[in-house]
């Protein structure tokens, strides 16, 4: 490309690059700097303290608890959103040679929770998961009252309960992505496999899954980022309580900003950014290597 | 050149210029004087709750705008959950509204009123106050405007009909209170409704009793705590008073689902007859008078002490005060607005609104009619000196973590001692972060 053409291309990209720099790069750099200060409401100036905030986070039991909760929540949602989403997609992708209306119905039903407001879901599930709520009543009525619990109060299971609600809300969304991926796989592979006598499980394992790797990559990365950044479900269902039992990184950020400890709140956000980058980038790279050309 | 035509053109030009100048100058003059006075507050303060006393009477605002046509008043509402962060951010960036509405002590702690707001103690309306001390901060200056005397209070809201049905008298000591709870429990009535999913509800008990302790038993308590000379866990009475509340939970006087239930469920609970009492404030009694007129509620002091004289009505910090930030764009207009709404005729307009009944803090304004529960508090407790200020008013840091430790205690994860030990650590951390001496 001639130099003039190159400059011409760069010139056209400059406005977008400038906007990106102003709205993303500069705030990112400013945030990184703020996370290394003792910026607090009421203090005349913010002093640079290096990694002091990060050392504090890694030594504070409550903040370490919120990091543990974040990981627990993320693992549950990634595993179940993807497993259930995948198998739901398999179930609604049954091909009998003609369009099946019941498939369309179930695809819609499974997807519907994803379009609901998380706050509305939080309010509804707060009632469902109440000790006297629908879930416990149903369990009692089918003779499983021993499984009834204080779903959002019992500190041992509160994070699992919140993750369960998130899985319920988003499994349809992931199902839709898996479904789109499955429908992009050529039928020729399945026909050839059937001729060779491959069972349905063999076809699933040897054809569907390898050819679906790009879709699996997308779903895993999306659910991973969503899990690490999870906020709405926790805030709507428990507010981080009881006590600090269901606090996650994002709700702690909100709490620290509410206390006026802006430097520490920014450091928590920076830590979250680092976690997302450190976990997701290598995973994405590794998963891309597993992708098979169809 | 045709001279006549030239003269005619000159005349037309002159006339047009004169016409234009005649429009432009007045307009320029008007646009230079037109001011939009912004008032920023949470949605709760703007609402018409029965005892918000926010004085956002539209009639007052209309009258102000009629008297000062160059000033337009604009209310900026913030969702309740975002109020603190929004106001803090605007103050930090130097772009606050002209007037802010916030609670007095919270503003002193969370909005750093001493550094961010102007001193209003020199204003003309300040000399007309009955109790100017109500509006002063620790440094002796007054950063707030508030036109009412405090006639609100927290205590034990009780169902008078349930008490009458079982022949129960109002308890005046802690032991009497336990006996009342046992009687109700025996009658299959849950003694107390606990909405402890909301962290701000349980704390009413300790903030009342600890506030009383500081006021009546140890005047230096909060000064010592705030200076780091004394730890919370080293004052046995604080642990004891908290343990008395924990005792109520352990004895099963609250419903089993108290950590799952919130304030929103309180009206249905208290009107059902299944619950007899509720640790709450006068606003709940007034709200229920509107929502469920058949439910007969009233209020008595939290009987946490063995000495009846110490069981008094706890009054919260003054809520919904107007403040003028130092960096407000229209300070003079803001001062004008406050002076205007302090005038007797404007206050009379506020008093005429039934849901805003209050006792004015101005000498030249008559008392007015209060809501029954507030009149009861004023007659029985304020006039007789049987009130105290909540502990929260004296603490210089955000108390949310302490309230969350209470939830841990209710859930059995922490003992009262553990709560205060954990709070010692968190309190020191928060005070150090604020640069408070002694930490």
Image: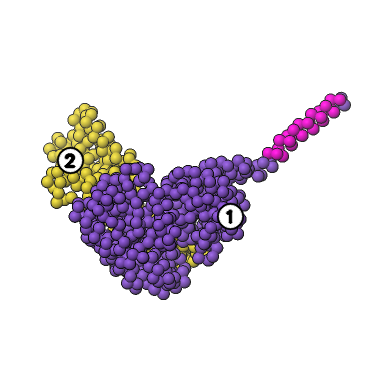
Chain colours: A yellow, B purple
Instruction: Identify which residue, B396 or A206, lies in the foreground.
Output: B396
Given residues B301 and A208, the one toward you in this image is B301
- Please report the bounds of the magenta region as a residue range: B4-27
Residue at disc 2, secondary structure: helix
Which residue lies under the disc numbered 1?
B125
Same chain? Circles 2 and 1 = no
Q: Is residue A29 left or right of residue A163?
A: right
Q: Residues within 10 Å of mark 2 (few under 14, many from 20)?
A: some
Magenta span: chief secondary structure = helix
Point 48% across, 66% down: residue: A48
Q: Is residue B246 above or below residue A289?
A: below
Q: Chain of mark 1?
A: B
Q: Quadrant of the N terminus of chain B?
A: top right
- Please say whether residue A82 is visible from this viewpoint: no
The answer to whether marks 2 and 1 mark residues whose Cβ atoms lie closer than 8 Å is: no
Location of residue B398 in the rendering, given as x and y in whole percent from the top left corner = 41, 61
Identified at 31% across, 68% down, the residue is B239
Residue A31 % position (x, y): 46, 57
Q: Position of residue B252 (x, y in %)?
A: 22, 57
Rendered view: B419 above or below B61: below
Rendered image: mark on residue B399: none
State the separation of the CA atoms marked 2 and 1. 84 Å
Q: Is residue B177 left or right of residue B339?
A: left
B195 up-or-down from B392: above or below: above
**Is any atom of residue B26 visible in this view?**
yes
> Can you tell which of label 2 and label 1 is closer to the viewer?
1
């Amino acid at each position: 490309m001639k130099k003039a053409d190159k400059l011409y291309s760069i010139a056209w990209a400059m406005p977008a690059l400038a906007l990106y720099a102003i709205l993303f790069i500069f705030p990112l750099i400013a945030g990184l700097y703020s996370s290394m200060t003792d910026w607090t409401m009421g203090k005349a100036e913010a002093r640079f303290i290096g990694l002091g905030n990060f050392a504090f986070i890694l030594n504070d039991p409550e903040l370490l608890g919120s990091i543990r909760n974040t990981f627990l929540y993320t693992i549950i949602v990634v595993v179940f959103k993807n497993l259930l989403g995948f198998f739901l997609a398999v179930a609604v992708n049954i091909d009998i040679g003609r369009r099946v209306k019941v498939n369309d119905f179930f695809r819609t039903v499974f997807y519907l929770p994803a379009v609901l407001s998380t706050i509305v879901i939080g309010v509804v599930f707060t009632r469902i998961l109440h000790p006297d709520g629908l879930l416990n009543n149903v369990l009692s009525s089918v003779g499983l009252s021993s499984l009834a619990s204080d779903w959002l109060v019992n500190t041992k299971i509160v994070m699992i309960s919140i993750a369960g609600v998130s899985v319920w809300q988003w499994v349809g969304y992931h199902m839709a992505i898996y479904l789109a991926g499955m429908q992009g796989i050529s039928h020729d592979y399945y026909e050839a496999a059937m001729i060779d006598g491959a069972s349905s499980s063999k076809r699933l394992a040897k054809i569907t899954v390898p050819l679906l790797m790009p879709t699996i990559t997308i779903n895993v990365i999306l659910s991973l980022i969503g899990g690490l950044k999870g906020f709405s479900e926790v805030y709507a269902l428990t507010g981080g309580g009881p006590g600090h039992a269901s606090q996650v990184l994002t709700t702690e950020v909100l709490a620290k900003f509410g206390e006026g400890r802006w430097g520490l709140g920014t450091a928590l956000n920076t830590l979250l950014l680092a976690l997302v980058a450190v976990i997701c980038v290598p995973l994405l790279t590794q998963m891309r290597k597993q992708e098979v050309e169809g | 050149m045709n001279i006549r035509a030239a003269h005619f053109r000159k005349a037309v030009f002159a006339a047009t210029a004169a016409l234009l100048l005649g429009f432009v100058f007045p307009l320029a003059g008007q646009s230079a004087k037109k001011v939009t006075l912004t008032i920023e507050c949470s949605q709760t303060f703007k609402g018409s709750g029965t005892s918000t006393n926010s004085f956002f009477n539209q009639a007052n605002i209309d009258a102000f705008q009629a008297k000062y046509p160059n000033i337009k008043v604009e209310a900026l509402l913030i969702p309740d959950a975002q109020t603190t962060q929004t106001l803090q951010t605007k103050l930090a960036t130097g772009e606050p509204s002209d007037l802010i509405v916030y609670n007095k002590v919270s503003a002193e702690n969370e909005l750093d009123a001493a550094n961010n707001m102007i001193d209003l103690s020199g204003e003309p309306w300040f000399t007309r106050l009955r109790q100017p001390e109500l509006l002063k901060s620790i440094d002796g200056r007054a950063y707030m405007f508030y036109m009412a005397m405090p006639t609100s209070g927290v205590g034990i809201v009780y169902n008078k009909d349930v008490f009458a049905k079982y022949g129960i008298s109002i308890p005046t000591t802690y032991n009497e209170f336990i006996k009342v709870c046992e009687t109700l429990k025996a009658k299959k009535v849950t003694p107390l409704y606990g909405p402890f999913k909301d962290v701000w509800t349980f704390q009413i008990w300790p903030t009342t009793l600890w506030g009383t302790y500081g006021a009546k038993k140890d005047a230096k308590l909060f000064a010592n705590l705030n200076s780091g000379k004394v730890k919370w866990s080293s004052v046995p009475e604080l642990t004891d008073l908290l343990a008395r509340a924990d005792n109520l939970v352990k004895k099963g006087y609250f419903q089993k689902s108290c950590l799952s239930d919130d304030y929103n469920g309180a009206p249905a609970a208290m009107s059902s007859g299944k619950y007899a009492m509720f640790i709450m404030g006068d606003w709940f009694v007034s709200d229920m008078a509107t929502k469920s007129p058949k439910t007969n509620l009233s209020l008595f002091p939290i009987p946490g002490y063995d000495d009846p004289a110490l069981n008094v009505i706890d009054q919260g910090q003054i809520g919904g005060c107007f403040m003028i930030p130092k960096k407000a764009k229209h300070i003079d207009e803001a001062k004008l607005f406050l002076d205007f709404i302090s005038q007797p005729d404007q206050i009379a307009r506020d008093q005429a609104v039934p849901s805003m009944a209050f006792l004015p803090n101005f000498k030249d304004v008559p008392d007015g009619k209060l809501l029954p529960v507030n009149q009861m508090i004023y007659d029985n407790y304020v006039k007789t000196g049987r009130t105290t200020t909540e502990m929260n008013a004296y603490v210089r840091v955000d108390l949310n973590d302490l309230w969350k430790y209470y939830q841990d205690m209710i859930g059995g994860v922490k003992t009262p001692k553990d709560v205060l030990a954990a709070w010692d650590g968190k309190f020191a951390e928060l005070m150090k972060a604020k640069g408070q001496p002694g930490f």
